[in-house]
Image: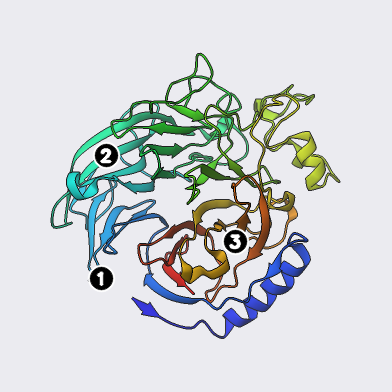
Amino acid sequence: MQTRTTKGNAAIIAAVLAATTALTAPAFAQTNTTSLTETYVLEGLDNPWDMAFLDDGTMFFTEKCLGLSVMLPSGEVNKLIGMKDSEGYDSTASDLFCDGQGGMNGVALDPDFENNRRIYVYSLSEMSDPQTNRVMRLTVSDDFTAVADRTDIVDDIPYKTDPSDHPFGDTGAHNGGRIRFNPGDGFLYVTTGDNHNAELPQSPTSLGGKVLRIDTDGNAAEGNTPPDGFDARIYTYGHRNVQGIAFHPETNTPIVAEHGPWHSDEITVLENGGNGGWDPRPDMAGRDDCPDDYCGYSPNQMDGMNRYERAAYMPMTDVETYPDAMLPIWDNNGYSQGTSSAAFLTGEQWGDWDGALVVGLMGIGFGGTALGQRIDVLTLSNDGSAVEDVIEMTLPVEPGRFRSLVQGPDGSLYTSLDSGEIIKLEP
């Protein structure tokens, strides 16, 4: 690992970011003066997508188009299982592949890993026709050099297989992919995307546009309460593309981060059986016909429409059609900038940020908006039902597409960037 101070171009970028933030940040945002240091944990990776830690600092991580690896506390990296064309891995799976946003995405460790050595990965597979996303369960060898006993505990999460399905986005788009165990109930939560398919978010049977809650065998979690006729694995539905999920450190309530349709990235507190209110079908909430029967981007065809008018025409949370929909507690000031990941900061080392939610943003210029590559710190109300303050984290690293945020066992914040780095941030 290498610790370094970013200078030169980074200072120029920081100045540009500061000026941009002053013009575009929400009125209640402030400049963060906390001094952070950075340690480059790994560099030269290929789209590192997610990380999961053991208490001793052992870090499992995925690279979207390569596979699953582990870095030991010594710094040694072992490549465990790769996709069909990957090289250098202990094993490869001939059915695993990457495409667009899909590939080897989220990773999570079994709460009882010390005894059962189990790890879970969300990945694309062509084992079925059409291809699907799957949640795989694997067993890690005692020496951390191999995995075995693959079991696909979920094998029917839809994937966008045909670019002609919608004129916006290629195959693999709106793919979801984050998986996390809730320390409160012990169940595995799985986030999925709508694939640019207008029927999926509100569908009772498709797993697209949903958050699933399952046990370690892939069965519906006891206590799930989806509406009558829905797949019992569905915890919430009516989502667009959830790529972040975290659990409140006091209550273990699940909170998700979701990409908006050229407006309104959303942070939402989940309610068992709740509807996120995303429904891009034509003729909903007074809309007219839309290209290829998907209204998710249609406001962009209308000259002169600002983000608030877009939100009114094609809302992320359609309360006109679904008055009981779960309301977001944050909408990125009406912008869509690729809010992809979420984690809670805990520990005295974070000072006033102890208990705050951090979210990573990836996008630049979505819908004519300003630079969106940053990490925001959201201070929540005591019950977690509202956002009281938002501060943009002043970073000692050049901004990038912050794909994943995970608090490590040492209390530091680890982030992976699409550019190929995993970086540790600490006060």
Residue at the spot x=60%, y=45% of the render?
259
Q: CA distance from mark 1 to mark 2?
A: 25 Å
Dot 3 amino acid type:
Val
Crowd rating for badge 3 (residues with CA inside 10 Å; few <14, some 14–19, many 20+):
many
Tag on residue 377? 3
Quarter containing the N terminus? bottom left
Is 95 left or right of 346, judged from the image as shown?
left
Q: Amino acid at mark 2?
A: Arg
Residue 181 in sight in this render = no
Among the two numbered marks 3 and 1 on one chain, the one whose residue lies closer to the N terminus = 1
Q: Is residue 190 above or below residue 33?
A: above
- At x 61%, y 57%, the residue is 378
Q: Secondary structure at mark 3?
A: strand
Mark-to-mark CA distance, 2 and 3: 33 Å
The kind of residue on which mark 1 rests is Gly
Q: Is residue 257 above or below residue 391?
A: above
Q: Is 60 situated left or right of 32 in this image?
A: left
Q: Nearer the viewer, residue 20 or 344?
A: 344
User: What is the x, y in percent for residue 352?
Assistant: 58, 67
Point out which mark residue 143 bears.
Answer: none
Crowd tier of the residue under label 2, counting other residues whose Cα lies within 10 Å: few below 14, some 14–19, many 20 or above? many
Which residue is at a point 51% across and 52% down the rendered structure image?
341
Identify the residue under disc 2. 137
Measure how far apart labels 3 and 1 are at the Cα level. 30 Å
Q: Nearer the viewer, residue 323 or 195?
A: 323
> Against 116, is 56 above or below?
below
Residue position for label 1: 75
